[in-house]
Amino acid sequence: MSRLDSMLRRLSAQRDGLNWAAAQIAGKPGEVLDMGLGNGRTYDHLREILPDRRIRVMDRVLACHPSCTPPDEDFLQGEAEAMLIRLADEGARIVLAHYDFGRGIKEDDVAEAARLSPLIARVLAPDALLVSGQPLVGFEQISGPDTIAKDRYLFYRA
Ligand SMILES: C[S@@+](CC[C@H](N)C(=O)[O-])C[C@H]1O[C@@H](n2cnc3c(N)ncnc32)[C@H](O)[C@@H]1O
């Protein structure tokens, strides 16, 4: 498969997964967390499909498209580890988290996701949903929407 095809499949899995998860949390209290602001695409999508939720977003750099700049109070700028600890210390209760950290080097990305998993667990509400591009550790893996091939994008319940 070409890298273009692979990227297109990844992006549509990401969108379908987020849409599916947004529907699952309807009526449940809690905030949303997007790990990896990047260009701001998934953050922008989340705020479009969940206009009434507070959406926290994390990244070590602010380098998104200007139209996707989050409000200062919702942007956690810094290394994930420190930012997750800060969020946990604030008593955050995240009902939906999206994990999109990574540089595209599989081995490093998988190791980072495993290392961050216990810290992610600390910010989640009971029964929270996790949508992730990388395998996370210590959560119950569940099936996502039928449109997404197994293991293309991953879904977990806290
Ligand atoms: C794949 S991009 C995110 C793409 C974004 N969700 C979008 O839709 O545009 C990954 C982002 O995660 C950030 N990142 C990766 N590891 C990180 C870490 N340990 N702490 C903070 N930010 C990190 C990078 O700076 C990068 O902007």
Image: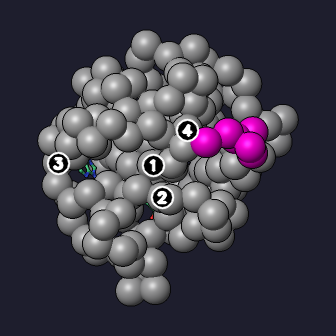
Could one spot residue 113 in this view of the protein?
no
Q: Are marks 2 and 4 in contact (CB under 8 Å)?
A: no
Q: Which residue is disc 2 drawn over? A: 55
Residue interval drawn in magenta? 24-29
Which secondary structure class fits the magenta region best? loop
Q: Residue at x 54, y 70 (%)?
A: 44
Q: Residue at x 61, y 42 (%)?
A: 29
Query: What numbered label is drawn on residue 95?
Result: 4
Q: Nearer the viewer, mark 3 or mark 2?
A: 2
Looking at the image, which residue sits at the far right?
146
Task: Locate residue 86 relative to residue 45 in the image: left or right.
Answer: left
- The Cα atoms of the two marked residues, 1 and 3, are separated by 15 Å
Q: Look at the numbered disc 1 and give the secondary structure of its residue.
A: strand
Q: How is the image coloured?
A: one colour
Query: Is ligand 1 less than 8 Å from the beta carbon at label 3?
Result: yes
Q: If you read the primary sequence from the N terminus, does the residue marked by circle 2 or circle 4 appear first?
A: 2
Location of residue 114 with respect to 100 vertically, above or below: above
Residue 17, percent across and down? 68, 45
Q: Are marks 3 and 4 in contact (CB under 8 Å)?
A: no
Q: Are marks 1 and 4 in contact (CB under 8 Å)?
A: no
Identify which amino acid the numbered label 3 is placed on.
Glu
Q: How many numbered marks appear?
A: 4
Query: What numbered label is drawn on residue 79?
Result: 3
Residue 66 in the magenta stretch? The answer is: no
- The Cα atoms of the two marked residues, 2 and 1, are separated by 6 Å
